[in-house]
Amino acid sequence: MSSRRGFLGTMIGGAAGVAVAGATTTASAAARGRIRGANDRIRFGLIGGGGRGKEILKAAIGCPNVEPAAVADVYTRRLDEAKAIAPGASTHRDYRALLDDKSIDAVLIATPQHLHALHFVAAIEAGKDVYQEKTMAFNPNHARRMRNALEGTDRIVQVGMQMNSGDGVRKVRDHVAAKDLGDVAMVETHHFRNAAYGGWMRDVPADCTPEHVDWKAFEGEARHVPFDPQRYINWRFFWDYSGGNVFENMVHTLGFWFAALNLSIPESVTSTGANYRSPKMSVPDTFQVSMSHPENVLLTFSSMFGNGYYGEGRDLAFGTKGTLIHGSSDEVEVVAPGARSGEPKKSAGSHKDLTSLHMQNFFDCVRSRSEPVCPLELGFRTSIACRMAVDSYRRGTTVRWDPKTEEIV
């Protein structure tokens, strides 16, 4: 199920866990994979019950005719927190117990980024439809493993780039189709947040100990280090588990513009920046990324955690006939190519959270067996582009994508 022609047909080569397992159900494995009625109940599980996991759990529960069946996480505190949200759900410290439940139709995965491939592949192999939080894949190897697991199945996959469930993508496509912009050669995007550590810093609870955290399960395929509660609670600070704000927020921007302009994986990526104000984390707090695409488009992304001037999502697409401005509340405006306002145009509203719409789209597609707005192939393209940005920053040089070997060079 791909929105880009032949994606699956022309492929080359082949921490927390929250699972939701329920009490009784009439659903069966045979019921999955068929078109369902709007009133058919979908039982789902959640793997990864941290902050984002609890958010998407609440969004899922808010959708009609769904049932939270089980929650799995490597940290006992997360299980208790998820149980408070979904009292009827069973809880597990091993995500495989969730996947063994044949009555569960779909799985939401919200684990740290380095664990996505491990949980996704196992979920697909268990016959589940999957809502996979971004960034879909940690590196090209993980992306290929996830794509190969999906190939030849009829599983539904939605990647959690919820901006794409708003009207903005459609509006941009309409302006492009109407030739309102002319030829677009540059897209300039921003994510500015005036918050120490990007607002990611979490206090370590007293019970975050080896007794309550399955450290080996959290590490997954990452290099082994002795148990460290800071690494577990503030995993976004460490390269072993995170891509920093590239994987946290740039991926949403790429998901939007890759879909709106039908952009391919960039040919080359250059990243520069540093960590100026956040000594407890390894990832940069101030950086810029420049991506050169085969569609003759240069896409740039600027991010910082020390100033909020541009906000979290003021983007501009520059064309020969017009400039398109997309704001954080998903509004779109086109102005003359030479127009200058002196000041950035403020969004018509605050940042719009489209998670509930995105989750509803997933469940609608589970019933209809149609393709969600963010299928795996869009997750694949954006994951590779994000990893290129991280690798360029860490190597201190421009990196390129080799489409034949599907490697970053």
Image (tube, rainbow, N blue to C red):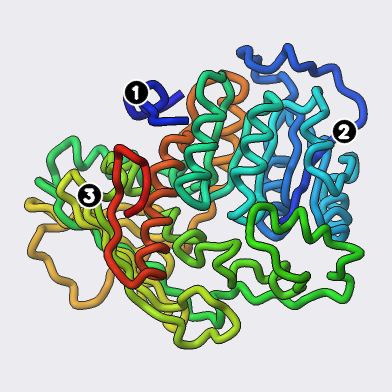
Q: Nearer the viewer, residue 316 or 104?
A: 104
Q: Nearer the viewer, residue 83 or 250?
A: 250
The answer to whether residue 317 is left or right of residue 212 is left
Tell me the kind of residue under disc 2. Gly
Question: To which quarter of the image does residue 132 belong?
Answer: top right
* Residue 179 place in picture, x, y as percent: 12, 40
* Residue 122 place in picture, x, y as percent: 68, 34
The answer to whether residue 267 is left or right of residue 388 is left
Tell me the kind of residue under disc 1. Gly
Whether the residues at callouts 2 and 1 have beta carbons within 8 Å, the answer is no
Q: Residue at x 75, y 17 (%)?
A: 29
Please give the residue where the numbered disc 2 appears in the rendered image: 22
Q: Nearer the viewer, residue 32 or 328?
A: 32
First in sequence: mark 2 or mark 1? 1
User: Label 3's element?
Assistant: strand
Please give the residue where the numbered disc 3 appears in the rendered image: 293
The answer to whether residue 118 is left or right of residue 299 is right
- Residue 325 visible, this orientation: no
Please give the residue where the numbered disc 1 appears in the rendered image: 6
Quick one: quadrant of the C terminus? bottom left
State whether residue 9 is above or below residue 389: above
Answer few, some or many: residues within 10 Å of disc 3's Cα (few below 14, many 20 plus, some between 14 and 19): some
State whether residue 267 is above or below residue 35: below
Answer few, some or many: residues within 10 Å of disc 1's Cα (few below 14, many 20 plus, some between 14 and 19): few
Q: Which mark is residue 55?
A: none
Report the Cα–Cα distance between label 2 and label 1: 38 Å
